[in-house]
Amino acid sequence: MGGNQSWITELILLGFQLSAEMEVLLFWVFSLLYVFSLMANGMILGLIYLDPRLHTPMYFFLSHLAVIDISYASSILPSMLENVMNLVLTLAITECMILVVMSYDRFVAICHPLQYTVIMNWSMCTVLAVSSWACGFFLALINLILLLRLPFCGPQEVNHFFCETLSVLKLACADTGTSEIFLFAGGVFVLVGPLSLIMVSYLRILWAILKIQSKEGRKKAFYTCSSHLCVVGFYFGIGMMIYLVPENSQQQEQQKVLTLFYSVFNPMLNPLIYSLRNDQVKGAFYRALQKKRGPCK
């Protein structure tokens, strides 16, 4: 680099290039979605904490998923700050790991029901949860270290609504090959790897369900997995479209929209799916309402 090269220390987020009226409309729309996401995930956390019937491994991991969704939405929507990149990556990776753990929980529950309480004891649940968070933190930290070692000499404008890693890398004025290779390898490890494990779990689950003689038993087994499958489909489907599909200039705006959907709607959809399609959660909600109203006179 030449001696007159100046380094930049601040970045400008371009966000979406919209009219002032549209920006005001979207501000209120996303503010309402954010509040709804907080309330829905908060309700899930509250019900799991208050209702002893939900003190099981499945809902233990669901509570971690709710914490991730609250944190994920809160790290992006209210401020769009530059310093949230590592937190966003940590939460995204941890959510992938938690979804894998939840698929393992369903596998044990359906394929080894008599050994479920022995295998999925609270020590094992704690180890799986802590490992998921640790994996998310360390992978995000490595990514951040690789990014911070790069020099940035302009332009200052990031074509995104938060400091998304791929968008920031484009501003580096040095070889970004190592960071790009790590990002792709990390995407394979965090998205393709966990999704493969989930698919293996559900293939084993499907095989076990088909062996159930009772039609009602098969239906009940399918129903217990349907909520998790819906969440996995939304999360991994959009994630792979953003990080594993080759990017071009025409797709850049589409990827921003997908990332927004990923950041706003996914945290809101998770509690809706798990509450509307889950009789135990609905039952806990009704019992909580009855306790609040008190006994009928």
Image (cartoon, rainbow, N blue to C red):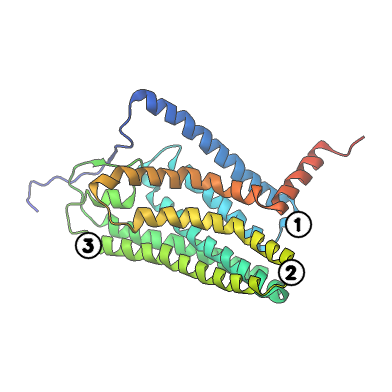
Residue 271: where, in percent of width, then height?
Answer: 60, 48
> Tag 1: residue type?
Arg
> Tag 2: residue type?
Ser
Residue at the (56%, 54%) spot, across then down? 65
Residue bearing mark 1: 53
- Which residue is at the far top? 21
Residue at the (43%, 68%) spot, across then down? 193
**Left or right of residue 266, residue 296 in this image:** right
Nearest the viewer among 163 and 204 is: 204
Count neighbours of disc 3 (C-alpha within 10 A) and say few if under 14, some if 14 to 19, many if 20 or more: few
Which circle, 2 or 3, is nearer the viewer? 2
Residue 255: where, in percent of width, then height?
Answer: 34, 47
Mark yes or no: residue 281 visible.
yes
Residue bearing mark 2: 214
Residue 44: where, in percent of width, then height?
Answer: 64, 48
Count neighbours of disc 2 (C-alpha within 10 A) and say few if under 14, some if 14 to 19, many if 20 or more: few
Q: Residue 177 — which label?
A: 3
Q: CA distance from mark 2 to mark 1?
A: 26 Å
Residue at the (22%, 48%) spot, across then down? 171
Give the structural element (helix, strand or loop) at label 2. loop
